[in-house]
Each structure stands twice: as structure tokens, then as C-alpha cells.
Image (cartoon, rainbow, N blue to C red):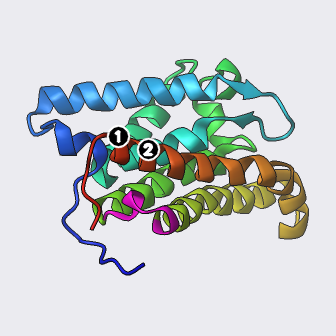
Amino acid sequence: MNFTLSRTHQPYLLQYCSVVQWPRKLLVITTGILFMALSANISIPLQPIPLSLQSLTVLLLGAFLGRRLAVLVMLGYLILGACGLPFFAGGHGGINVLTSASAGYLYGFIVSAYIAGLAAERGYDRHFFSGLCAFALAHQIIFFFGVAYLAFYLHTDIYHALQLGYLPFAGFDLLKFFIATLIMLSLWHCSGSKQH
């Protein structure tokens, strides 16, 4: 099937709601931060990296909000969590989390949200294959940052860091970007959006 992906698509939320004025932007960013905090606290406390729904939430926020607002959500989430609010996995908070073994994944959220948001702005999330590829790339960025930082943190090689910080999660996280793709396709389909 041939289709052209336009550079003028709006992310899902912005397609139906104007978020130009700063009070609305603040409301959207605050809501996104709360979703991130909630998803972080639905987790399985594995060591050294907990398993949570955060990365799925990052992908969906990028698709819903676009790159700019999604990045602001991630920055706000990290700042408020660093200030001590229990926003990180397992209800943790404080600046020390941003230097812990899992800190690289948190930093990866920013880049991942940007990529997922950019993909939405190009209309990739309105098609299965392009959406799957875009979400897969955005999701793997989180692991790139996470594993690289974990290797640095543990003073070990990348292979050992992959065994600790990637392989145990690979199957479940494959499911996450597949779910993100299906959610966005379903939403666009239900809203009666025209695919080009």
C-alpha cells in the first residue's frame, strides 16, 4: 500500500484541542507529569532496574502531545522527582535517583518523547508499520541511554550492562511499543481521522 506521510499532521490531542495559551499548556504538562508518576509507581521492583509502565507512557505522551510539550513533560517530571516528590519507580524521589543505576533510562525519556512526538507530527502513528518503527526507535533510545549509563555506573562493559539492563526486559518492552502502536491506530480510527 502506497501512502505519503505529511509533515503537517497534528499530534492526537492537538488535533482536537487548542493548547496555545499558557494556562492550557500548564494543565496539559501537569497532567502528563502525573501520568508519568502514576506509571512509574506501577512497577515490579527488579534489580538493578525496576520494570514499570513508564516507557509506554513516554511513547503515548509523545504521540498525544508532540515533541515540544512531551519534552517539557519529561523535564518537569525529572525536576519534580529530583525535588523529592515520590514520582520515580517504587515511590522514590530525590536528586540521588538521577545518579542511581537507573538514571540513564530517565534521561532517555527526554529523547524518546521527542522522537515519538516528532513521529506523530509527521503522521507516522496513523499507519501500523510506520508507527511501529517510530515507536520501536523511540523506545530503544531509552535503552541506549540506560545501558550506556549502567555500564558507566557499574564500571563494567556494555555486554554485562546489556545482560542486566536490557535482556531481562526485551520481551516485555517489545510488547510496549506494539501496544502503543495499536492504541494510537485505534484512537485515530475511532475518531474518524482520514489516513493519507
The residue beneath circle 1 is 190
The residue sitting at 33% across, 25% down in the picture is 30
What type is the residue that disc 2 sits on? Ser
Q: Are marks 2 and 1 in contact (CB under 8 Å)?
A: yes
- Main SS, magenta residues: helix
Quadrant for the N terminus in the image: bottom left
Between 196 and 76, the one lying in front of the other is 196
Vertical order, 55 against 171 (above or below): above
Q: Is 123 situated left or right of 173 in this image?
A: left
Vertical order, 131 against 50 (above or below): below
Q: Is 183 situated left or right of 179 in this image?
A: left
Between 190 and 40, the one lying in front of the other is 190
Quadrant for the C terminus in the image: bottom left
Q: Position of residue 6 (x, y in %)?
A: 24, 71
Q: The magenta stretch spans which residues?
A: 123-130
Q: Position of residue 159 (x, y in %)?
A: 88, 68
Which label was assigned to residue 186?
2
Crowding at dot 2, Cα within 10 Å, few <14 / some 14-19 / many 20+, comes out as few
The residue sitting at 75% across, 44% down in the picture is 101
The residue sitting at 70% across, 54% down in the picture is 174
Q: Is 69 situated left or right of 103 in this image?
A: left
Which label was assigned to residue 135?
none
Question: Gap in Å between the C-alphas at discs 2 and 1?
Answer: 6 Å
Vertical order, 67 against 83 (above or below): below
